Image: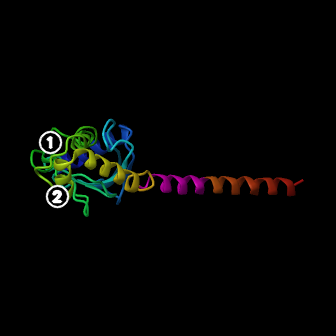
Amino acid sequence: MSSPSKRREMDLMKLMMSDYKVEMINDGVQEFYVEFHGPKDSPYQGGMWKIRVELPDAYPYKSPSIGFINKIYHPNVDEMSGSVCLDVINQTWSPMFDLVNVFEVFLPQLLLYPNPSDPLNGEAAALMMRDRSTYDLRVKEYCEKYAKPEDAGAKPEEKSSSDEELSEDEYGSEDEQVAGKADP
């Protein structure tokens, strides 16, 4: 079992070194969030999603579980649960693939080339097949409404941690000034 464990750690480290923001859920390396940006030249461009990743004990021999935390309008993503219907992840996964493949190839391809004939969101699939331009507008509306950095948890976390650091720094420097003035 040490081989899958080492592979999990290696793939996670590789993902982090590929400039993806990764937030661990628990102490282990099996559950985490990844910040994912919509692909350029698509109606998802400018959107940011928080993706939950769960690695099974048998990873990389068994595929990771991938789900969108904030809402996305897409035929192959369940709007309520965020579950992803993607053949390469769910059915044709191979140990040759890694987490970087998921975020640099598989998810961007899913957003660029939806498959309305195998939907998890029937409404999105029907609209896409019936009226692509209205579908694209709906996607952009969802991006504006649900896929801003704060929706993916980016800004509030960054603000709160940097605000805390700033206020601690300021507090510390004020103490030093007060202490410095009182000493002489």
Vertical placement of residue 111 versus 58, above or below? above
Is 11 inside the magenta-drawn segment? no
| Identity of the residue drawn at 26% across and 64% down | 80
Residue 63 falls left or right of residue 170: left
Q: Position of residue 15 (x, y in %)?
A: 32, 41
Q: Position of residue 17 (x, y in %)?
A: 37, 38
Magenta stretch? 153-165
Question: Quick one: label 1, few (<14), some, or many (20+) residues within 10 Å?
Answer: few
Vertical placement of residue 107 versus 76, above or below? above
- Secondary structure beneath dot 2 equals helix
Quickly name the residue at label 1: 95
Distance from Cα at disc 1 to Cα at disc 2 = 31 Å
Q: Dominant secondary structure of the magenta stretch?
A: helix
Question: Label 1 sits on what residue type?
Answer: Pro
Is 157 inside the magenta-drawn segment? yes
* Residue at the outermost right position: 184
Instruction: Identify the image quadrant of residue 171.
Output: bottom right
Work out whether residue 103 or residue 117 is closer to the camera in this orientation and state it.
117
Quickly name the residue at label 2: 122
